[in-house]
């Protein structure tokens, strides 16, 4: 379909809906009254946590209830009633639930691993700090599955990685279902005083109706959560518990891989045994130390395969438990905006830098074999974190990675070469609440120090420091806000290291047309800065919201030693405006519309980007969801496309995306996502097709598959920068025809809430064919065809024996330069099979089989034959391990 037709179709489709999408005014009862519940201390035997709420102890306190519907019909009475009771003693908090259901045989008891949040459930959020910004969340499902999260930033962040030790059981009876919960006070944080008032909230999910009801009503149109909680009274005489948990582990591992004749490091198999220790120590009632010695993450799922031709780094999510838990404390996003954009990934602390692949590679010849560590060993790491009763949040983390060596063998003797230096990482984060959390001021500092003495790694920074200050100020019941931050970076090292930094992809100081930049080959340090300032409105009982601001990265900013930085030398203005309808009307459950635009400049003042986006999303009353959107980019100047060459003006473009998702509660679920981008100068065409399907034959088994297929056609794909004998540079580009096929396959079998089997598999293949080679001649010309010259067929020839292209620009039968054949066929398969048994709370046994295989094929063949002949036929790298942990608690 023509791109303009697509844009017009999307507009005509959504405009009538928008015009009629004005729900009728609903007169609701005043629900703003703050609720409270009065608990009592257990007098006698404590409740037995078995899901049966007939214990005599529960008779000593009254029922709490009167829940209010939160969605879909906000403020109305819920379909089913809910009640709760709360008791406590010197060590624990106890909660009993009565979830009434007029059709108990239809209660959904879906099984999953911890934090699955599937089926019917009920949840309590406890603001034991009573800072009205953070809370601890405990969820129990009708099937007995537990979920827990740490809530921060007044409900803006929910951290599922928080895994406290607590106890819960549920039962189904003729009136619905019941549950009992015991939460050790050592898992909560609260002040040391005689009487306490805690914030508290309850939420229940009615699975069949996809309905949420809450105890303390908080409108979905408001931008608050924790600050709107009801209150828990009656807690007297409890003392903060100093937490002490020690968890040693042992791992046995066997690896099998393809045997390579003559290679002493590829004998076909390897075995190892590893020991380590994790721990948690409560230093005060507010502060905790977490530590790990020689950590092992063998049970962690492999990263998805990816291939980037644009030069930008790929951002992989953190999956390792030690770095996931409590990561919200160390969060410092340079830009966090509703307007979106790739700059959202920029952060001061990116934990994947710790323990990543070694930076170095040994100097070997064709007769030598090398064994190089895949990852740097983390000797140990420690986190000190918590929040005081006065609203001071503090997080400090330090980690040390060991010096790594590559082993090299020439057939007679072995030698070693350093590929990663001994490195220390430090991260510190602080935030202070004022005005009841409506004003927050904070700061962050990071440091990386490497011991490069005696290594050949002088191209690395010897030290790297970054830091920043940030603030958030909200007013008018948190409806309006202004926030911002300013950051700095300082990297130090040899002249080689700093020169490399200046010429790295993120910086490109060597650009010939960048008059405001130049490479200083004598520099031994580099100092940069960046920041963001934004103003916005959310909530307030109104449907219209917006956010606008500016973010910048100076050319010298460098965060990638322990942070993540995608690009520099940019100043970006962004604006987002949204209109949302939360109340059901007509056939819709809810709906929202968004508008975004972006403008960008470099630090010389050159306008480099103009773009806008409109999108709309709707959920129907049958819980199907649809959405569509379009981007229009009339002006785009890239300082990265030529990898240090001049700025390159990109062609105008327009894109459209559409998705559909079925009801996630059904046994069979499906959806699709379609994306199509057109270059309006006929210079590019990108298509992406992604579908997914899931099947849940029983409450214990879930199977899903997500295949995707991408087609990338680009007339100006970077190939190489070639320096001729006379010193001239040829910025070589070509037309690329790239096709990528991938899939994600998952099988989850949850035998019970503490015993599960999970499989993850992901085949991936990407093939690219280059043709019609070009050299950039006038990179900024307004006419697309004037920006380059295309080589004719008699100006270059392919040598199949050497697999190279020879270029003869003047057709004088003399080779001016040659390049390797850029065609590629990259394939990868990764999988994990994990059996996890939590045999007692906090103590686990893992059985793991990981498999990986990476290969290359013939770019001239089709995708499927290449997969079969060059990937699945090769011997894979297999890892079999058993990990045993035991948690000691006090």
Image (cartoon, helix red, strand yellow):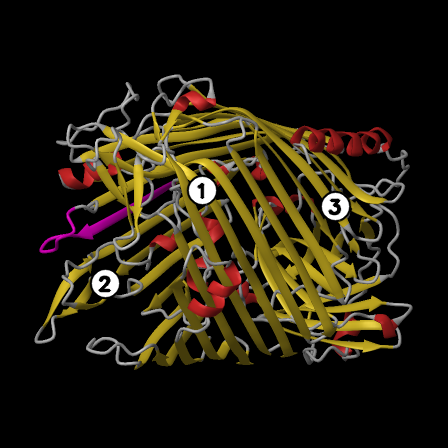
Q: Residue 55: percent from the left, percent from the top?
A: 76, 79
Q: Between 210 and 499, which is closer to the camera in this rendering?
A: 499
Q: Is residue 453 magenta?
A: yes
**Nearer-N-terminus badge (2/3):** 2
- One can see residue 336 in this view: yes
Q: Is residue 719 left or right of residue 38?
A: left
Q: Which mark is residue 402?
A: 2
* SS label for mark 2: loop
Q: Is residue 754 magenta?
A: no
Q: Residues within 10 Å of mark 3 (few under 14, many from 20)?
A: some
Q: Residue at x 58, y 34 (%)?
A: 678
Q: Which mark is residue 338?
A: none
Q: Residue 292: percent from the left, percent from the top?
A: 36, 67
* SS label for mark 1: strand
Q: Residue at x 41, y 71 (%)?
A: 298
Q: Between 80 and 867, which is closer to the camera in this rendering?
A: 867
* Looking at the image, residue 694 lies above or below residue 232: below
How far apart marks 1 and 3 lie (CA) works out to 33 Å
How far apart marks 2 and 3 lie (CA) works out to 50 Å
How far apart marks 1 and 2 lie (CA) works out to 42 Å
Task: Identify the image quadrant of residue 697.
Answer: bottom right
Q: Is residue 565 left or right of residue 453?
A: right
Q: Which mark is residue 736?
A: 1
- One can see residue 388 in this view: no
Q: Residue 233: percent from the left, percent from the top?
A: 69, 56
Q: Which residues are magenta?
A: 444-458
What residue does disc 3 label?
A: 626
């Amino acid at each position: 379909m023509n791109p303009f037709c697509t844009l017009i179709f999307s507009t005509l489709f959504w405009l009538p809906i928008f015009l009629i999408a004005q729900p009728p005014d609903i007169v609701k009862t005043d629900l703003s009254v703050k609720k409270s519940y009065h608990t009592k201390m257990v007098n006698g035997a404590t409740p037995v946590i078995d899901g049966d709420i007939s214990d005599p102890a529960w008779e000593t306190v009254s029922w709490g209830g009167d829940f209010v519907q939160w969605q879909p019909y906000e403020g109305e009475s819920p379909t089913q009633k809910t009640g709760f009771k709360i008791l406590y003693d010197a060590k624990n908090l106890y909660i009993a639930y009565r979830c009434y259901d007029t059709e108990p045989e239809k209660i959904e008891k879906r099984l999953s691993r911890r934090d699955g949040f599937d089926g019917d459930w009920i949840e309590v959020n406890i603001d034991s700090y009573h800072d009205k910004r953070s809370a601890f969340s405990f969820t129990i499902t009708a099937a007995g599955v537990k979920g827990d999260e740490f809530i921060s930033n007044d409900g803006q962040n929910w951290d599922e990685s928080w895994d406290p030790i607590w106890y819960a059981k549920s039962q189904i009876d003729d009136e619905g279902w019941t549950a009992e919960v015991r939460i050790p006070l050592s898992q909560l944080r609260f002040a040391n005083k005689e009487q306490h008032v805690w914030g508290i909230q309850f939420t229940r999910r009615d699975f069949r109706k996809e309905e949420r009801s809450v105890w303390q009503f908080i409108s979905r149109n408001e931008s608050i959560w924790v600050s709107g909680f009801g209150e828990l009274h009656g807690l007297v005489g409890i003392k903060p518990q100093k937490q002490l948990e020690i968890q040693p582990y042992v791992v046995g591992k066997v690896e099998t891989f393809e045997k390579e004749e003559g290679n002493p490091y590829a004998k076909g198999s390897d075995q190892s045994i590893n020991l380590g220790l994790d721990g948690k120590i409560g230093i005060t009632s507010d502060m905790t130390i977490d530590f790990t010695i020689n950590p092992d993450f063998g049970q962690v799922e492999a990263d998805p395969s990816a291939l980037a031709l644009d030069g930008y780094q790929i951002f992989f999510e953190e999956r390792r438990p030690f770095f996931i838990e409590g990561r919200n404390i160390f969060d410092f996003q340079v830009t966090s905006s509703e307007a979106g954009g790739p700059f959202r990934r920029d952060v001061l602390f990116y934990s994947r830098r710790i323990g990543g692949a070694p930076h170095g590679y040994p100097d070997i010849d064709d007769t030598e074999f090398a064994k190089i560590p895949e990852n740097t060993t983390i000797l140990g790491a420690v986190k000190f974190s918590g929040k005081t009763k006065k609203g001071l949040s503090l997080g400090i983390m330090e980690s040390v990675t060991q010096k790594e060596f590559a082993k090299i063998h020439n057939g007679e003797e072995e030698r070693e070469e350093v590929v990663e230096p001994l490195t220390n990482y430090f991260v510190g984060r602080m935030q202070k609440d004022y005005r009841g959390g409506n004003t927050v001021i904070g700061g962050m500092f990071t440091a990386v120090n490497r011991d490069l003495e005696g290594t050949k790694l002088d191209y690395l920074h010897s030290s790297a420091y970054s830091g920043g200050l940030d603030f958030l100020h909200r007013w008018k019941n948190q409806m309006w806000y202004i926030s911002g931050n300013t950051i700095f970076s300082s990297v130090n090292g040899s002249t080689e290291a700093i020169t490399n930094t200046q010429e790295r992809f993120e910086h490109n100081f060597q650009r010939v047309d960048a008059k405001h930049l130049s490479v200083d080959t004598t520099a031994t340090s580099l100092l940069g800065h960046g920041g963001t300032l934004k103003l916005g409105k959310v909530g307030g009982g109104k449907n219209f919201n917006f956010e606008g601001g500016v973010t910048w990265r100076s050319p010298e900013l460098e965060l990638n030693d322990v942070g993540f930085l995608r690009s520099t030398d940019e100043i970006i203005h962004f604006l987002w405006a949204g209109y949302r309808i939360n109340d059901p009307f007509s056939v819709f459950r809810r709906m929202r519309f968004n508008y975004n635009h972006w403008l960008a400049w470099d630090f010389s003042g050159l306008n480099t980007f103009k773009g806008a986006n409109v999108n709309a999303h709707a959920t129907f009353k049958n819980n199907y969801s649809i959405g569509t959107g379009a981007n229009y980019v009339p002006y785009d100047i890239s300082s990265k496309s030529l990898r240090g060459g001049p700025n390159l003006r990109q062609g105008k473009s327009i894109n459209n995306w559409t998705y559909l998702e079925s009801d996630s509660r059904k046994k069979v679920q499906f959806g699709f996502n379609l994306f199509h981008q057109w270059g309006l100068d006929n210079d590019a065409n990108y298509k992406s097709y992604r579908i997914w399907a899931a099947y849940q034959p029983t409450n214990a088994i879930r199977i899903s598959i997500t295949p995707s297929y991408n087609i990338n056609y680009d007339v100006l794909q970077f190939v190489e920068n070639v320096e001729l004998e006379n010193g001239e540079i040829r910025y070589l580009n070509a037309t690329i025809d790239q096709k990528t096929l991938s899939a994600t396959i998952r099988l989850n079998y949850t035998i019970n809430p503490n015993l599960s089997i999970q499989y993850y598999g992901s085949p991936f293949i990407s093939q690219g064919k280059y043709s019609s080679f070009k050299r950039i001649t006038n990179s900024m010309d307004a006419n697309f065809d004037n920006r380059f010259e295309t080589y004719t067929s008699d100006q270059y020839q392919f040598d199949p024996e050497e697999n190279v292209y020879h270029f003869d620009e003047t057709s004088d039968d003399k080779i001016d330069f040659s390049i390797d054949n850029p065609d590629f066929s990259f394939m990868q398969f990764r999988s994990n099979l994990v059996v996890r048994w939590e045999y007692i709370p906090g103590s686990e046994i893992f059985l793991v089989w990981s498999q990986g295989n990476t290969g290359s094929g013939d770019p001239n063949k089709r995708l499927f034959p290449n997969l079969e002949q060059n990937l699945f036929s090769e011997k894979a790298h297999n890892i079999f391990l058993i990990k045993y942990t035991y948690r000691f608690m006090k």
